[in-house]
Image (cartoon, helix red, strand yellow):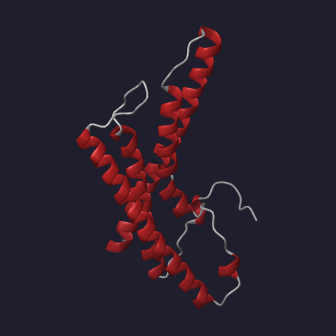
Amino acid sequence: MRDPVGSVLDAVDELSVWGAWASAFCIASILGLIVAEVAARNLLNVSLYFAWEFSAYLMGGAFLLGAGYALRAGAQIRVNVLLENVPKPVSRFFDLFSTACGVVIAAYLAYALGELTWFSYVRESRSPERSELLRWIPQFPMFFGAALFALQMMARLARLLRGEPGEDQRLRIGQDIE
């Protein structure tokens, strides 16, 4: 049986997995929109005016919805030269310090995107494009992804403070690039 903190950390990991699936869905949707646009132009000589706009929204959502999972899997870009060439206590300090800075930055990003989404909702702000989509609709997945990223960053800090590894190497897909 896991301790209460471990259970919360597991729940954050599970949310990050769901975020990764949502990210994959966004990427598949981009593919579908672009293929439909190319087919419509070449076969029907019409353009799907919304395809590029919605693809851009989906790309933002895909990026942020997958960020928490990427952090947990250790798939983010990181320079390990310093961490690998200093004594263990110094390496641990740098890892804790950079993660604490990451928590602050991720929390601010989530807050700012949450505020942007809320104001767009309250003001009924619409896209300037022909679709006139309510802006909060594409902004919400970006906010949610940023919130997941912030939670995962906090979970990483908690793991490091507990003496556990910050990444779960079993989640990685592919090989390290050196």
Residue drawn 52% across the image and 49% down it: 63
Residue drawn 45% across the image and 81% down it: 161
> x%, y% of residue 62?
50, 45
Q: How many numbered circles are shown?
A: 0
- The picture quadrant where one finds residue 12 is bottom left
Where the C terminus falls, by quadrant? bottom right
Looking at the picture, tell me which residue is in the foreground, 106 or 155: 106
Q: Is residue 18 visible?
A: yes
Q: Is residue 97 above or below residue 74?
A: below
Residue drawn 48% across the image and 78% down it: 160
Q: Is residue 10 visible?
A: no
Q: Is residue 159 above or below residue 66?
A: below
- The picture quadrant where one finds residue 52 is top right
> x%, y% of residue 13?
44, 60
> x%, y% of residue 6?
38, 71
Image position of 67 (left or right of 137): right
Q: Residue furthest front?
A: 128
Where the N terminus falls, by quadrant? bottom left
Q: Residue furthest top?
A: 44
Image position of 120 (left or right of 45): left
Q: Residue furthest left?
A: 122
Q: Is residue 141 above or below residue 70?
A: above
> x%, y% of residue 16?
45, 55
Image position of 52 (left or right of 15): right
Residue drawn 48% across the image and 70% down it: 102
Looking at the picture, tell me which residue is in the foreground, 85 or 118: 118
